[in-house]
Amino acid sequence: MNTATLPPMAMWQRRTRLHLGAESGVRTLAQGPSADTVLMTDRDLPEAVTGPLAEAARVASGGRLRTVTLDPRALTLDAVEELADTVRGSTRLVAVGGGSVLDAAALARLLSTDGQAARRIRHGGPRPGLVALAGAPAATAPHEGGPELVAVPTTVGTAAEVSSAATVLVDGARKLVMAEPLAADLAVLDPQATATLPTGLLLEGVLEALCRLLNTYLPEPGPHVPRAGDAEACSLLVRLAGAGHEAAPGQGLAPAAAPPELRTELALLSAQTVLGWSMLGRDPFVGKVWYLANELSLATGARKMSATVLVLPAVWARVLAGDTRLGDAGRLRTAWQAVRTGIPDLPEDPPAGIAELARRWGVPACRTDGQDPAVLAARAARVWGAGLPMLGAFRTAELTELYTDVLEGAPAA
């Protein structure tokens, strides 16, 4: 048989183990190796979250613990290279924080064992926006030559604790780096780590997980997307929407008061959007909304999800009008019906519905005062288009029209 003419096989393998449940963070770190350990934490986290974890790691390491506090807003590639020097030679690396901190730790671990990775990420400046690095295949053992990476997320939604992709700032632009060794060896979903997370940020994270799943589901699947993958995606949409609705302030919960069991469920559902069958066989570059929103976020200084909820209605309107490069209209209706199964009183129209869900969950669309759609389009085309698989199917003029629609939906000044 001539296999050269066949499409590539779908493959599914994950290196990350999960620990979850009450006090799972302390219990996991208490079982750590009696050897050099580096603990990286978000500098803004309260002592109530980081203190018990640091003490457990200190005791387990026999006192050989180095603690590094990070500013999640200043994690450039230069900063990550410095972190790699700190990590090099350690046995265990523990990262406690949101997506930016977890990404920085994963990249630092990678750079500490791969002397060429930083050069390859930096190559070309902001162009291209995505860098795929060859690495060791997924495995259950720690990355050879580097420390075991333990990720303890203090937010919900990014799934950085289980992802083999990470973002980093290079020359003021956000680059997406993909490499199997970026995935943590162990992810700890401890509700104690999200105990101080405000309800607004919890819901923003749930919306991020929903949007990630929606963006990958919408395009017509290729020959290797099994029906089981589509079925799991729709089931996840129902469960995420329903659990998010339960955590919303309108359900009688005070800020930061979602019960531990619900926070654990939301964290697990978010991780499942990356780990589960729903991703099996899908094109890794189908999430066009992410690339468009990324450039809008950088240009406006807005939070990533505030840019996303402004971009989504404009993109979905084009999907419903028949632009199959952005997704399939029938699949969008199916996916949105799954969301409405979890939250039945949302509008039936997907663009109106996602805008309403963002409003209910307190995720505002970003302000775009003074932004020029042509400038945004040129920037997006340079970073993600012009022959690249992310936005290469779109001419700059088409991106300008799309950003014009996006800006027309922005909040009034």
Image (cartoon, rainbow, N blue to C red):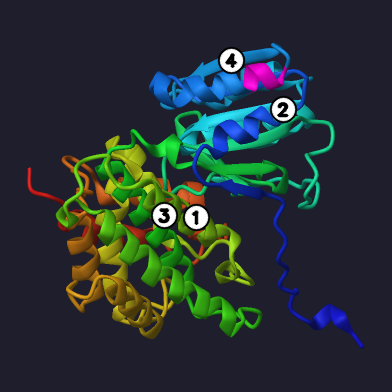
> What residue sits right under mark 2 in the picture?
92
- Going from N to C along the chain, the mark reached first, 2 or 1, is 2
Q: Tell which of 200 and 335 is nearer to you.
A: 200
Q: Position of residue 21 (x, y in %)?
A: 52, 46
The quadrant holding residue 108 is: top right
Q: Which residue is mark 1?
A: 268
Is 291 above or below relative to 322? above
Which numbered disc, 2 or 3, marks the residue that appears first in the sequence? 2
Instruction: Give the number of callouts.
Output: 4
Secondary structure type for disc 2:
strand
Amino acid type assigned to the residue bearing label 3 in the image:
Leu
| Position in image of residue 285 (x %, y %) | 55, 61
For mark 3, what is the residue? 266
Camera-side residue: 213 or 259? 259
Q: Quadrant of the N terminus?
A: bottom right
Q: In the structure shown, which secondary structural element does the residue marked by tag 1 occupy? A: helix
* Amino acid under disc 1: Leu
Seen at 61% across and 82% down, the residue is 226
Query: Which residue matches tag 4?
Result: 67
